Amino acid sequence: MNKLRFLSVYNSPFVRPKIKWYFGKVAVGVPYFLPKKRFGFNFVGLGWKTKWDEDDFRFEWNPIISFVFWKWQVALSFVSDNMDTYWEAWIYYELRTDKTKSKMERLAQCRVKFPITNTTYEGNKKYVIDWYDFILKEKYLIDHEYDRIFKNLKK
């Protein structure tokens, strides 16, 4: 995936990542080390890998733009509240869903083929958290077309 491809997240059903600014002494890695030159520019794309199979995506680092001058740094990081689940789900959406389908159909495929859920227990009560409910734009959460597509995919 090229370094700028992550920008298509802004045109997707996923909530927009926040831009986190840093200004100060060199402290933001790019990604494994601190910038070492007196003057420099680094653009680091979204860091990810596959683990056990071709669809087992693992988030490693956020995209970063870094400017260094002498011992000072200005860095912009593109972050999400739920970074691991957010970026891993978006990578699946971007690379493994059929782009000829609608966004709703692609999201339904994500929920079936790449679920991101956690199960917790509080006493005898079981709670299942579907992280798609936190990382998608609101208009993609409540849709009858989506429910119909999702049910058909599950069959």
Image (spheres, rainbow, N blue to C red):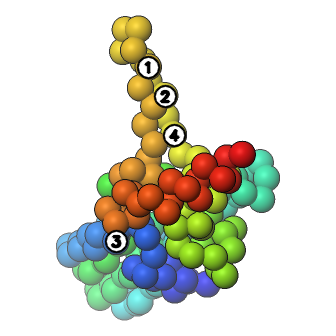
Q: Which residue is mark 4?
A: 117
Disc 1 versus disc 3: nearer the observer: 1
Gap in Å between the C-alphas at discs 2 and 1? 7 Å
* Towards the viewer: 65 or 150: 150
Asked if labels 1 and 2 touch by Cβ distance under 8 angstroms, the answer is yes
In which quadrant is the N terminus drawn? bottom right
Q: Residue at x 66, y 81 (%)?
A: 100
Asked if labels 3 and 1 touch by Cβ distance under 8 angstroms, the answer is no
- Expressed as whole percent of the image width and height from the top left, the position of residue 67 reads 34, 86
Secondary structure at numbered mark 2: strand
Q: Which residue is mark 1?
A: 126
Q: Residue at x 53, y 73 (%)?
A: 103
| Placement of 26 over or under 127, stated as above or below | below
Query: For the residue carrying disc 1, how many other residues have a C-alpha within 10 Å: few (<14), some (14-19), or many (20+)?
Result: few
Asked if labels 2 and 4 touch by Cβ distance under 8 angstroms, the answer is yes
Asked if labels 3 and 2 touch by Cβ distance under 8 angstroms, the answer is no
Q: Which residue is mark 2?
A: 119
